């Protein structure tokens, strides 16, 4: 029996396809495992907060944010702890990261408010406008933006 050229090439093509599929599946499983781990860390941190162990909660939130595939809630919660302790720049960094991962009007409002309090008026205006794009009737953002525009003139 004579082997045709197509039969000769079909095995390597199928094998390469299988390898691509396998590694894509493996990557997806790894990504889901990291997200599950991050969610566990967030839930555990919230449990620690309920028992008054804020430092331990921050430790687990930091672990959640250091994972390759994190969750935005970890960044937002960690930012709230940093704000409470007075670490404004660190809080701002985590709020921006959380806002990139999952845009939310309250996150953008808080970033805008912090930027305004730091005297970074252009950044504050940009984030307040992002906030109003997501929720145009958010009265606090409208008032803060009007106040900001009045002070920029």
Image (cartoon, rainbow, N blue to C red):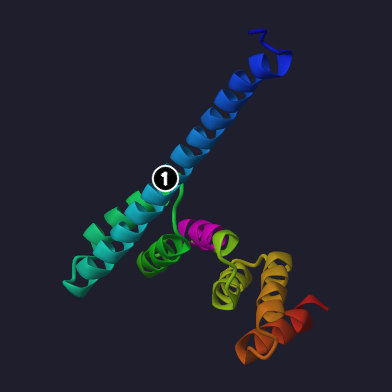
Give the farthest residue toward the left.
51
Q: Point out residue 61 in the picture as x, y percentages from the top left corner.
A: 34, 57
Q: Residue at x 52, y 56 (%)?
A: 93
Q: Quadrant of residue 129?
A: bottom right
**In-image side of 142 versus 49 (left or right):** right
From the image, tell me which residue sits under label 1. Answer: 29
Q: Which residues are magenta?
A: 89-98
**In-image side of 138 versus 93 (left or right):** right
Question: Where 116 falls versus 100 (above or below)?
Answer: below
Give the farthest residue toward the front.
1
| Label 1: which secondary element | helix
Q: Point out residue 22 in the picture as x, y percentages from the top left corner.
A: 48, 34
Q: Residue at x 67, y 75 (%)?
A: 128
The kind of secondary structure the magenta stretch mainly shows is helix
Question: Where 57 falls versus 64 (above or below)?
Answer: below
Q: Nearer the viewer, residue 111 or 11?
A: 11
């Amino acid at each position: 029996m004579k082997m045709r050229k197509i039969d000769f090439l079909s095995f390597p093509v199928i094998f390469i396809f299988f390898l691509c599929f396998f590694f894509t599946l493996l990557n997806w499983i790894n990504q889901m495992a990291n997200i599950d781990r991050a969610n566990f860390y967030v839930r555990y941190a919230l449990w620690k907060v309920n028992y008054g162990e804020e430092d331990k909660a921050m430790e687990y939130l930091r672990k959640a944010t250091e994972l390759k595939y994190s969750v935005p809630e970890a960044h937002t919660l960690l930012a709230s702890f940093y704000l409470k302790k007075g670490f404004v720049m660190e809080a701002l960094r985590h709020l921006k990261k959380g806002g990139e991962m999952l845009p939310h009007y309250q996150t953008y409002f808080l970033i805008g408010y912090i930027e305004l309090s730091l005297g970074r008026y252009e950044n504050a205006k940009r984030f307040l406008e992002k906030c109003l794009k997501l929720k145009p009737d958010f009265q606090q953002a409208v008032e803060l933006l009007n106040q900001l525009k009045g002070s920029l003139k």
